């Protein structure tokens, strides 16, 4: 079985190392330019793929069938080449994040959730929260690179889930730590924990999201 990760820039990825520990199959990195995508999907020598930026939405038209989750989100992170050569697309991010929220033990139904960022991961996170009965609001980065007012909105929530990128050492990290201390009791903090902030790996309440994906 030939598997791998499809993306445009993958030098940061730990996926081959992870899959060597998880199973006995070939797992490669497939760095593909946009103009090469169609040929790779239709004629590439692979059996299964994980899909990362910028292709989670771009691969959807090439799928002969989609899971209900992938269809609802309009986003695919897993591709399987079926026996007849057609492609099946799924989105496993939803189940992984849902499992983390449930395992945290913090009920989110009827609560307010603040999600920082508007990328593909935030779409899935908001979908999970909505299905769990939470009111999710996304804040995207403004033109000057700041997320204005996120802390004030967070402190105003009685209980929330905050999704943010991990902050490296320096003044910004100290400021972020100070903000964390002022969050309301019971807040559930989900942080992106990869060094580059580009792989979908999170820590929620001290648990590693990778174990649930």
Image (tube, rainbow, N blue to C red):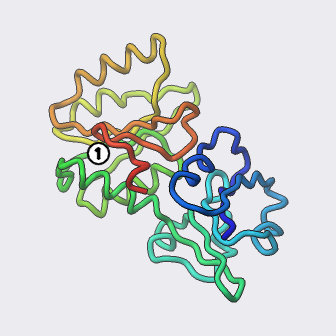
- Asked if residue 102 is positioned above or below residue 68 in the image, the reply reads above
Q: Nearer the viewer, residue 22 or 35?
A: 22
Spot occupied by residue 45 in the image (x, y as percentages of width and height): 78, 70
Asked which secondary structure carries label 1, the reply is: strand
Decide if residue 50 is on the left or right side of residue 156.
Answer: right
Question: Horizontally, is 211 left or right of 121 in the view?
Answer: left
In percent of the image, x 23 and y 60: which residue is there?
133
Image-quadrant location for residue 166: top left
Q: Where is residue 161 in the image (x, y as percent from the top left)?
A: 29, 42
Looking at the image, which residue is at 65% across and 56% down?
A: 5
Which residue is depicted at the point 71% across and 52% down? 29
- To which residue does mark 1 refer? 113
Residue 208: horizontal and vertical position, in percent? 38, 43
Asked if residue 46 lies left or right of residue 190, the reply is: right
Q: Indicate left or right for 139 with 111 as reference.
A: right
Residue drawn at the location 45% of the way across and 16% of the way down: 172
Image quadrant holding the N terminus, namely: bottom right
């Amino acid at each position: 079985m030939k598997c791998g990760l499809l993306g445009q820039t993958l030098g940061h990825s730990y996926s081959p190392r992870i899959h060597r520990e998880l199973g006995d199959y070939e797992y490669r990195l497939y760095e593909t330019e946009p103009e090469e995508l169609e040929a790779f999907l239709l004629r590439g020598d692979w059996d299964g793929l994980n899909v990362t930026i910028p292709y989670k939405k771009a691969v959807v038209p090439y799928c002969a069938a989609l899971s209900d989750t992938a269809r609802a989100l309009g986003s695919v992170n897993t591709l399987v080449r079926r026996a007849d050569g057609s492609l099946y697309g799924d989105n496993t991010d939803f189940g992984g994040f849902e499992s983390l929220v449930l395992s945290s033990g913090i009920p989110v139904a009827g609560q307010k959730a603040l999600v920082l960022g508007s990328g593909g991961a935030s779409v899935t996170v908001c979908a999970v929260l909505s299905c769990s009965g939470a009111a999710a609001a996304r804040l995207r980065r403004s033109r000057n690179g700041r997320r204005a007012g996120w802390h004030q909105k967070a402190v105003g929530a009685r209980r929330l889930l905050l999704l943010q990128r991990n902050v490296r050492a320096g003044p910004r990290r100290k400021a972020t730590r100070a903000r964390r201390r002022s969050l309301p009791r019971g807040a559930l903090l989900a942080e992106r924990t990869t060094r580059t902030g580009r792989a979908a790996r999170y820590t929620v309440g001290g648990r590693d999201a990778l174990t649930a994906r």
